[in-house]
Amino acid sequence: MHTEVNPESPFGGPSVPKHHAAGLLGRDSELDTITELFRIALGGRATSAVVVGEFGMGKSSVLAAAGELAEAAGFTVAIAAASRLETHLSGGVGRQLIDGLTRTPAESLPDHRPQTEHDQTESLDAFFRTVRHAAEQGPVFLGIDNIHLADPWSMRCLAYLRHRVEHLPVLVVLTSLIGHLQAGEVAWVEISGCTPATIRLRGLETRHVAEFLRISPGRFAEECREVTGGNPYLLGALRHRMVPGMDTGTAGSAMIGEVLRVRMHEYTAAPKMLEAVAILGEDASFDLLARLAGVDEITALEAIDTMVRVHLLSNSHLPALTYRFVRNSVLADMPLTTRAVNHSRAALLLHDSGAPPERVGAHLLEATAIRIPWAVDVLRLAARHSVIDGDPGLAARFLVRALEERLSERKRMAILLQLAHAEFRCDPELAPARVREAVDHIDDRETAAFVATAMILSLCRGPDARLAINSAGQFAARLDAGGPDAVWPLLCMTYLAEAGSRLGPPPDFRDFEQQWAPLNDPAAQQSRSGLLAFDTVRSGKSSANAVRHFGEALSAEQPELFEQPYFFTLATAVLADEAALTDRLCQVLDTKRLPWDFHVPKGALATLARGIALQAGGDLVRASVHYESLVRQFDERDATSLCPVAVLCAARLIETSVDLGRFDVANALLDKIDFGATQALFTHNYLLYARGRLRAVTGEPELGYEDLRGCGRRLEHHGMRFPGFAPWRAHAARTALALGRTDAAARLAEEDLEAAARWGAPRILGVALTTAGLVRDDALGEETERLLTKAVDVLGGSTAKLALAEALTELGAAQARHGQDEKAIATLRQAAQSSKHCGARPLARRAAESLRDARVSLATAKDNEHGLTKQEYRVAVMAAQGLTNREIAEALHLTRRTVELHLSGAYRKLGITGRTELSSALGRSQRADVRSPRNSAPACDACACKDRKQVPNCVGVYGR
């Protein structure tokens, strides 16, 4: 070793070398600690140090380097190395030390342990005299490597020496494996003293690892340090196997594995436990380790305790090998067959203990060339979970492994289609070949149709849906020879998938209608009824016919049709008002198996259907609970913006939160959704509608109006005339009215009323009538009251409690506006109770405020001598104060035509010809009854908030 003289060294010797051997990279501080002890020894006092570290950490190299430095500093150096194979040789370490001190073969120590006490004393004295003689000539460096393996007699000699050389220039340096249990008659402290300098060797830093491996510092060097812990011995083994582009996570050395296996043989059951830990990896719970190793728990615990103490295992609740390289090395040391069988045993243990399929599958992947029949279903489920977690490559590996088993043609076909999807996620070019391979395995038409249908239900969006539709087309062409009953259900499911994935109109429905006559199969009849219901819904013609067809489709026991996202979305919208059919739908959807769509949690469709029915009935709180539980599950699967069912659920929760007044919840949920990712889905329309409603009531009515109109344009382009899917016209009309766009509001309300009348369902018609009543506000309020009263009558016979509460609130507010305070009080009292029962806090607050204002108005109302109605009097006073008709209309939320009618009535009753005579006719004492908007903000008469600002961002009739 090349060294440099250090003139500042306290003992005139060399400094720590600037360049150490490879194994000593990064050991400068440890060597400095030892060289600091030189000063003590040179001062005439004995001292000691203990160097500890795990296997391969470089203890022997540090001791050798320290010996060289000591020799350069003038020490007489004697180093002995204990060995596992020489532990039984009495005096082996002591003889090496004497040889080093005298430079001649030691004869003072016997070849075996002396038998008599006199002989023992003579031998111990001889060893001491040899050391003392050397120390009298100059400082002595005694190094004992692997003291934990030293023979008992040598350890006794070293212990005998310690007290007798306290005042001699002797430095004793020991090295030991960390955590090694001392079982001999002499403890190390009896050799090194009570306060030795303890030096713990740790792994090399990244820069030293890079230098050791002769690579550039960077990510690869960091990875090498991570898998080896910076252990020099492991790094040396890794260096011999380094190739460009290697994966450090899989690197290992069979030689290292063999060394560890041999060294663990001195501990009971340790080799078996070492292999079990390597096989189980992250699944290595204590009970599984003991069972896989085939030992009892007490023996297993003792072995684990030993391996943790020597840092072969990490000190954690789940035992694991300290470094990845060590685990790979232990596995590399196993014969392939042994490793495969052990992985298969581990897979079975994990499966029986209820471990997740992907963890069981990880071991099944390693159990190659072994037939495990039960593994197929586990591997398919593991593949499903991997796709959910965004790892289609791993899913493909699981499925390829499943194909290695002995399979029926039916199961092989299903696995090939599942594999086609997984590979499609990785490389779309691979999928068609897998689909063709699956088609070649068709040996049963019914099974093939079922498998293709399952694929359509599994792949629900974008490119995935297109793959499923194309694959189903190939299957249908192969099945066509079996007649319409064999292929019809698949064709119908394909049609629905095609319709739901289009932004434009769906394919021509009549092409299918011509083939219905010969169909006798129950599944085909169910599909026929379902498509009849779909066609009726899309045309918006008759709710009664749609309900009847849905009921016929529900009479079958097959849930697949209602699991199709597009069909489910429309069916739940139609059946929300049909309690018996909703119950039946939930029973059909509540299957024991997992949904075909891997995004959808088990039982989610039934829960969502129930929530939609609760929302339609006005039970907002319970509906929101259903939606929130599902949204959490979809969030956990990162599916909220990907799955059409998840998007529908999120949109429903946003809408319900608006009605509940939980605007912060609605905004937070909307912020989490990738709006762009949902645009290819049909349920995006409902999301657009829900966002429009939210914006309209939270200070962005213009944006809300655009969203609602955008929803309408998309639905119209899609050919969807069903007014109950997303009642966008009703809310767009109300928003337009609040924005002062009365013509647009009137047109939308009229279109909505026509569509609702054609459809005929009470809830849909009642909402449309309520909107029309708001828009058609005339001078006397007769048309408004007629429409709103009709809305109340229609909704009163339905389960739509929230829609009824809205109609009652608007009717009561209209009655109050037109001076019918007593009728308004009765109506608003009922409205307040109903809206509170629904949990609709904004609506309940508005009804309560309108009710309070009506009571105040009734209590303070005075008959006037002119016989003017309350509204005529209010308009006349504002005109007398100089307001124009337009300003009066804006202040009272009336049309200008209505203002003109009120003024004409007032002129007639007052016996005047124009507004210049109003002031004198009314009398100055009455002018203060109504505030002027020129001097202060006008009362928001249309929504009765009276400018109290209790409802944020009020936008008139729609602002609640």
Image (spheres, rainbow, N blue to C red):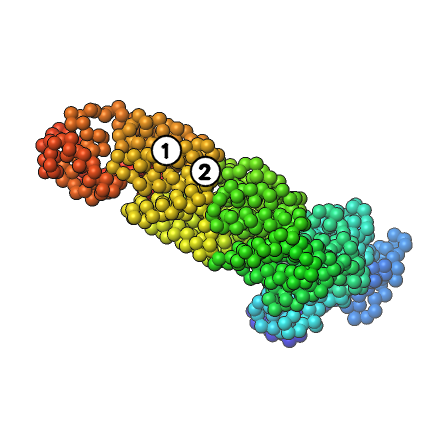
Q: Can you say which quadrant of the picture contains the N terminus?
A: bottom right
Q: Nearer the viewer, residue 414 or 700?
A: 414
Pinpoint residue 867: horizontal percent, then vertical percent. 18, 27
Q: Residue at x 73, y 67 (%)?
A: 253
Residue 358, placed above or below residue 231:
above
Res 681 seen here: yes
Q: Position of residue 118 (x, y in %)?
A: 88, 54
Q: Could you give the CA–CA distance between mark 2 and mark 1, rounded to whole angstroms?
A: 14 Å
Q: Residues within 10 Å of mark 1 (few under 14, many from 20)?
A: many
State left or right for residue 842 relative to residue 265.
Answer: left
Task: Mark yes or no: residue 325 visible.
Answer: no
Image location (x, y in percent) of residue 112: 88, 59
- For label 2, the SS is helix
Residue topped by disc 2: 762
Residue closest to the eye, 656 or 499: 499
Residue occupying image coordinates x 51% and y 48%: 536
Q: Is residue 918 left or right of residue 61?
A: left
Find out whether the residues at labels 2 and 1 contact each other: C-beta distance under 8 Å: no
Residue for badge 1: 789
Closer to us: 403 or 759 = 759
**Quarter of the picture holding the C terminus:** top left
- Name the residue rendered at 12%, 38% in the picture: 915
Res 385 → quadrant = bottom right
Residue 712: give x, y in percent of width and height: 41, 52
Residue 43: quarter of image: bottom right
Q: Is residue 313 above or below residue 827?
A: below
Number of the label disc, if any, that sits on residue 200: none
Query: Mark 2: which amino acid?
Result: Pro
Name which residue lies at 25% across and 42% down. 895
Q: Counting residues from the N terminus, which is met first, the one under dot 2 or under dot 1? A: 2
Q: Amino acid at mark 1?
A: Thr
